[in-house]
Amino acid sequence: MLDYSVVVPHYNQPGDLRRCLRSLLDQTVSRSSYEIIVVDNNSQTPLDPIRKEFGDEIHLVNEPQQGAAHARNRGMAQAKADLLLFTDADCVVAPNWIESCADSLETSKLCGGAIEVVTENPARRTPTECFELAFAFDQRKYIEEKRFSATANLAVHRDVAAQVGAFRDQVSEDVDWCWRAYDAGFPIVFAANAIVSHPARRCFKELTAKWRRLTREDLNLRREYGFSLQSTMLRQAAVAASPFAHWIRVMRRKDFSLREKTGAVAVLFAVRFYRFGYGMRLLLQDRRAWQARKAAVSAA
């Protein structure tokens, strides 16, 4: 009988997926106790080499509706075990990841683990990689202060997942799903020993692509949850002001050279100003939708 179902969404990352799957097959729990469900989301890259290498070790399915949320939902629908574990195709999980998630789920219904940012070549880190090392994936803060976990490292009891429902597309799906779990009476806890590693973005182009997506999804979520346009604009202004407080975090890094610190601070200011400008442009374009949503919430 299966104890755990691991769900891995995939889109055009066969090399990363291969590393992820190899780490999932090197776990401290019995291999017969868990299944690995890879949900491909219309990749253009053929997956025949993955099928050939891993064979019956994985359950490979396709989700035709584009989006990671839909892929995770397909994975949940295919899962057979009572404990559901989520990670991403570009992550590598620690050997005790499944075991640590299971330990946490003995006393909680929902947990998120730590995410360690790694670089391609630690001896030659780019300014963007150094920025990501300093600021990306603060899971403890996400979970303990903001009540959500990134879906790159999330585990839940199947019955809770059924009550919370599907992941939703076009919004910050991890935030939205965990907030709905919290509202249903299932607060998330931090599982410090359940560790996955996630690659840092290497260049500014990759970083801005990430933040365009996250900013769109965050603003959609705030609008749906009834936050006002004014408070959201103030929040965007705080993003622009934040580098003046956060640069010191970079300068205190003992593992960064002076060159790396200078580069990371430059990226910090550049990406926060970029996020501010992009977010404000979206808010001004969609202000009628925000006003309509505010009227609907007031009338409810």
Image: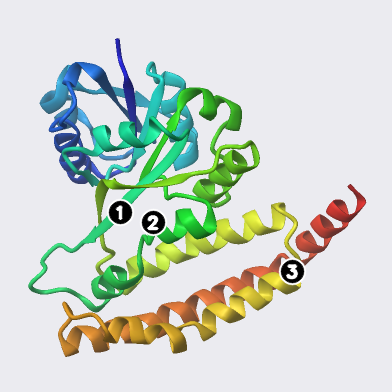
For image coordinates 45% across by 27% down, the residue present is: 157
Q: Are marks 3 and 2 in contact (CB under 8 Å)?
A: no
Three-letter code for the amino acid on which mark 2 is drawn: Gln
Q: Amino acid at mark 1?
A: Ile
Few, some or many residues within 10 Å of mark 2 (<14, 14–19, 20+):
many
Decide if residue 107 is on the left or right side of residue 102: right
Of the image marks 3 and 2, the number of the one nearer the N terminus: 2
The x, y position of residue 28, in whole percent, is 15, 31
Image quadrant assignment for residue 282: bottom right
Mark 3, Cα crowd under 10 Å, few <14 / some 14-19 / many 20+, is many
Q: Is residue 48 above or below residue 126?
A: above
Do we see residue 169 in this rendering? no
Is residue 129 placed above or below 107 in the rendered structure? below
Please tell me which residue is depicted at 23% across the width and 80% down the height of the picture. Answer: 253
Cα separation, mark 1 vs mark 2, equals 7 Å
Q: Position of residue 159 (x, y in %)?
A: 52, 23
Q: Name the residue beneath numbered marker 3.
A: 229
| Identity of the residue furthest to the top in this view | 1
Q: Is residue 17 above or below residue 190?
A: above
Circle on res. 115: 1
Q: Nearer the viewer, residue 180 or 234?
A: 180
**Looking at the rendering, in which quadrant would you find the N terminus?**
top left
| Marking on residue 139 | 2
Q: Is residue 153 above or below residue 49?
A: below
Q: Quadrant of residue 249?
A: bottom left
Instruction: Give the left or right position of residue 179, taking residue 255 as reference.
Output: right
Confirm or deny contact between disc 1 and disc 2 (CB under 8 A).
yes
- 254 and 34: which is toward the camera: 254
